Image: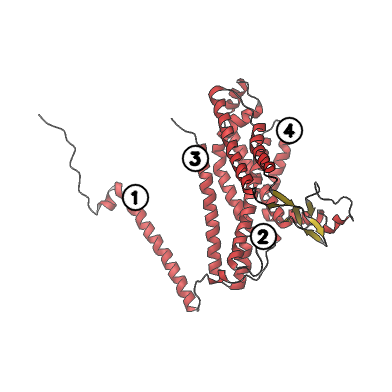
Amino acid sequence: MTTLSDPPRESFRLSMLLNDTRYRSYTLQFIALVLLLLLFGYLASNLVTNLADQGQNISYKFLGEPAGYDINQRPIPYDSQSTHMRAAIVGVLNTLIVSVLGCITATILGVLAGVARLSPNWLLRKLMSVYVEIFRNIPVFIWILIIFAIMAAAMPAPRAFRGEDPEASPLFGIIALTNRGVYIPKPILENGSGIVFAVFLLSIVGVFFYRRYARNLLFNTGKLLPTFWPTLGILFLPALLVYFALGMPIGWEIPELKGFNFQGGVQIRGSLIALWLALGIYTGAFVAENVRAGIQAVSAGQTEAAAALGLRPRRIMNLVILPQALRVIIPPLISQYLNLTKNSSLAIAVGYMDITGTLGGITLNQTGRAIEAILLLMLFYLAISLGISAIMNAYNNAMKLKER
């Protein structure tokens, strides 16, 4: 009687690294990695050698020296005696502020314009087509200059609010729109303000869980719960109740005209607004095309089936079309967010001091440390781009079709 057994395993030999298909790909990848590391090592060694021959070396001690220049838009305290490191941090925050605001604006405009481009309303559809074609075919740099010039020419000067111009008056009595920027009230935090913010953050979490519960209830039982008004109530009512219960611990500093300019409050400079609107509207045109393509990628039978079940057009778009279209929309949307963040480096054209204007501009010229400044700039943009990609890829994986 014969017995079946596995054939004896062949002992490993070095020649198998190239001859055996099981190991060949790993071997080639390892060789490519080693060659790449050697290339970078050679370039770095060559750079250090050339700098040494010129009596220079790579040093970041300049970051601790006084910057000696002012920054017009300061999200954190800063003056001319602050260090170059502090100036770079201010530039980083300014870049992040305009990037976040631009991405939010581009997303809202893009979704609305993308859906409107497929509207049965002929006028609305053509208007959105004109918006998309005009903005995406003109360089964003030109749009930044156009919006900045319009703001400088159309907005009244601060002195007009003295009563010289009867049409110039603060919006709602607390917001001043001028050619130098927008002045808004500044919050004054007192004891208990942290509790109000904590309650508001918990309310945001509560909104997430309520909407998730409403969606699951709809999918499981078909029962439709209202979401708009309950969402507003959960989001604002608890924080408002705590705010008044604690004796209004958050006050407001209203901007007032003193001398030739407004004092107090928070100034949002025209350069920030121009850059924000230009990047948001320009990128929104590209996002609109991504949204339109994603919606058209969903089979028309999905819309017909949802309508046959009695769903209204708005519900069909929110519950049937967009959830499926997101799988097509998100990948190119990531590229648009990255492009917007990198295009924010054009801020220096309107005097907005982002990281390129501070570290890559004035600091570089004052210290002469071009290599160090450029390396830090590359590291920052690489880090923010990888961060955006990681967040959006995680969201993309969450929206993928789950197979059983």
Q: How far across and how far down the image is residue 247, in percent?
A: 70, 45
Mark with earlier residue (4, 2)? 2
Q: Nearer the viewer, residue 25 or 205?
A: 205
Q: Nearer the viewer, residue 237 or 103?
A: 237
What is the count of numbered marks? 4
Mark with earlier residue (2, 1)? 1
Looking at the rendered image, the quarter that the N terminus falls into is top left
Q: Give neighbour class at mark 4: few <14, some 14-19, many 20+ (Cα, 10 Å).
A: few
Mark with earlier residue (3, 4)? 4
Q: CA distance from mark 2 to mark 1?
A: 52 Å
Question: Is 33 positioned to the left or the right of 197 in the image?
Answer: left
- Disc 1 secondary structure class: helix
* Contact? badges 2 and 3 (CB < 8 Å): no
**Where is mark 4, residue-wise?**
122
Q: CA distance from mark 4 to mark 2?
A: 46 Å
- Disc 3 secondary structure class: helix
**Where is mark 1, residue-wise?**
25
**Where is mark 3, residue-wise?**
397
* Contact? badges 3 and 4 (CB < 8 Å): no
Q: How far across and how far down the image is residue 272, in percent?
A: 69, 55
